[in-house]
Image: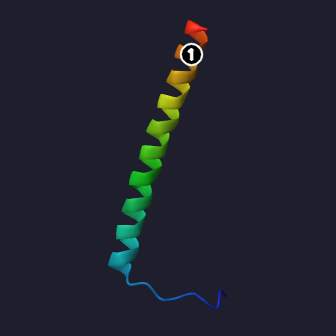
Amino acid sequence: MNKYFVFVPQHIEREVEKDIQVLSELEAERQALVRLAQQAGELSA
């Protein structure tokens, strides 16, 4: 067990999970935009 482990109340845990979900959705969008930009760059090159 991690000695730095701190008990986190259930509702805070759910908030964190929601934040992580939002972040991963934003990251997925960012990666899609990067791919589109790369494809556009290849087309114009």
Q: Determine the image quadrant of residue 42.
A: top right
Q: Is residue 24 above or below residue 36?
A: below
Left or right of 19 on screen, residue 24: right
Q: Is residue 40 above or below residue 18?
A: above
Disc 1 on helix, strand or loop? helix
Q: Is residue 29 above or below residue 45?
A: below
- Residue nearer the viewer, 19 or 40: 40
Q: What residue occupies the far right of the structure in this picture?
A: 1
- The residue positioned 37% from the left and 70% from the top of the image is 14
Q: Residue 23's spot in the image, x, y percent?
A: 43, 53
Q: Is residue 9 above or below residue 36?
A: below
Quarter of the figure that contains the C terminus: top right
Q: What residue occupies the far top of the structure in this picture?
A: 44
Q: How is the image coloured?
A: rainbow
Residue topped by disc 1: 41
Quarter of the figure that contains the N terminus: bottom right
In this rendering, the count of numbered labels is 1
Category of crowding for the residue at label 1, using alpha-carbon neighbours closer than 10 angstroms: few (below 14), some (14–19), many (at least 20):
few
Q: Amino acid at mark 1?
A: Gly
- The residue positioned 52% from the left and 15% from the top of the image is 40
Left or right of 32 on screen, residue 15: left
Q: What residue occupies the far bottom of the structure in this picture?
A: 3
- Residue nearer the viewer, 20 or 34: 34
- The residue positioned 39% from the left and 61% from the top of the image is 19
Q: Determine the image quadrant of residue 4.
A: bottom right
Q: What residue occupies the far front of the structure in this picture?
A: 45
- Residue nearer the viewer, 38 or 32: 38
- The residue positioned 40% from the left and 68% from the top of the image is 16
